[in-house]
Image: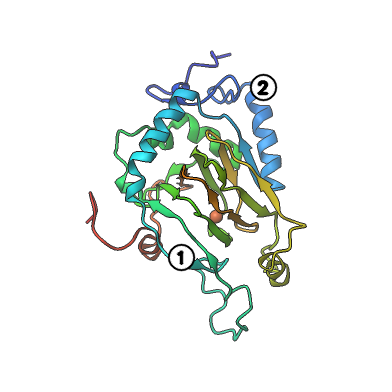
Amino acid sequence: MADARTAPFPDDPIAKIVDLERYPIADLESPAAAALITRMREELVYPGACCLRNFIRGEALTELRCEAEGLAHLAYGGPREVTPYFFNYRIGEGKGYPEDHPTRRTTPRRLGQVAGDLIPEDALLRRIHRSPGLIAFLAKALGEPALYPLADRRQSLNISVMEKDGCQQWHFDRGKAVITLLAQAPEGGGHFEYVPNIRSEDSENYEAVSRVLNGAREDVRTVEITAGTLMLFRGHYSLHRVTPVEGKRRRLQLILAYADKPDLQGSAESSHLHYGGQAAGSRD
Ligand SMILES: [Fe+2]
């Protein structure tokens, strides 16, 4: 069996970054890694969220936090009142739904996102995202034959920045899975909440979504995510949000985007809404 600290890929920063004793992902064929992946796959089926706490080693976490802090001022705020179906969905258009229908209900969105092309090439943030060892591990956990960093230079890697009172509205994700890494937790608040599988391929279940928007809590799960936690989340069917951040310390979270094809680009509309339309840095 390979040494737990030995990464199988040359120049892969995985051994420097990941707590390989806690999460033995350098050797994916080992029984310990197989057990971890089995557990993750089960959690991703239900409840749909899988948190790996203390995934990042102490020094690497400090480096990540400093890099993210240094870039936080570049975050673009975007829309501040958004429906659960986000700005890309036109799910309710032309249906004549009343004003209180979930497709027309907005809640506050108070966050900014640093676009991927503003993150330096040599940043540890980037090296984590491109780590072959991490990618191989994520592909196994998600049951994908292969994964590639999203080719879209703005959408591939983002830093989500929440200042005091920052939050994310109740919403569904467009993609099937999202990978996040919390670089810095706030002093209070900023909790992740979700309602597992509230909708399905067959039913939008608007009635249940309305109840949650009206404050029903019985099906809501709360996850307190600590700095250094890697989270895999299937947010397409599970309504979710981030509660308001308390205190002065920012909540800084990396969003690591992957695709099952090496050349996949995101939509220009999504980029415009998330990062704005102005040229900056290396942009055209
Ligand atoms: Fe989301």
Residue at 53% x, 80% y is 93
The residue labelled by disc 1 is: 80
Q: Nearer the viewer, residue 5 or 51?
A: 51
Q: Secondary structure at mark 1?
A: loop
Q: Quadrant of the C terminus?
A: bottom left
Q: Residue 1 at x, y = what percent?
A: 58, 13
The residue labelled by disc 2 is: 31
Q: Are marks 1 and 2 in contact (CB under 8 Å)?
A: no
Q: Nearer the viewer, residue 258 or 51?
A: 51
Give the number of callouts: 2
Q: Quadrant of ligand 1?
A: bottom right
Nearer to us: label 1 or label 2: 1
Q: Amino acid at mark 2?
A: Pro
Q: Nearer the viewer, residue 242 or 202?
A: 242
Q: Residue 148 at x, y = what percent?
A: 44, 42
Q: Nearer the viewer, residue 128 or 10?
A: 128
In the picture as drawn, the residue positioned furthest to the right comes out as 218
Image height of 49 relative to 84, above or below: above
Instruction: Tell me, yes or no, if residue 253 can be seen here.
Output: no
Image height of 217 relative to 57, above or below: below
Instruction: Tell me, yes or no, if residue 219 can be seen here.
Output: yes
Write down the quadrant of residue 279 in the picture.
Answer: bottom left
Image height of 205 relative to 284, above or below: below
Q: Residue 166 at x, y = what percent?
A: 49, 54
Q: Secondary structure at mark 2?
A: helix
Would you call the spot at circle 1 few (<14 residues within 10 Å), some (14-19), or many (20 or more)?
some
Residue at 55% x, 16% y is 4
Please tell me which of labels 1 and 2 falls first in the chain: 2
Q: Residue 21 at x, y = what percent?
A: 58, 19
Q: Amino acid at mark 1?
A: Arg
Write down the quadrant of residue 241 in the picture.
Answer: bottom right
Real-space Cα separation, disc 1 to disc 2, in angstroms? 47 Å
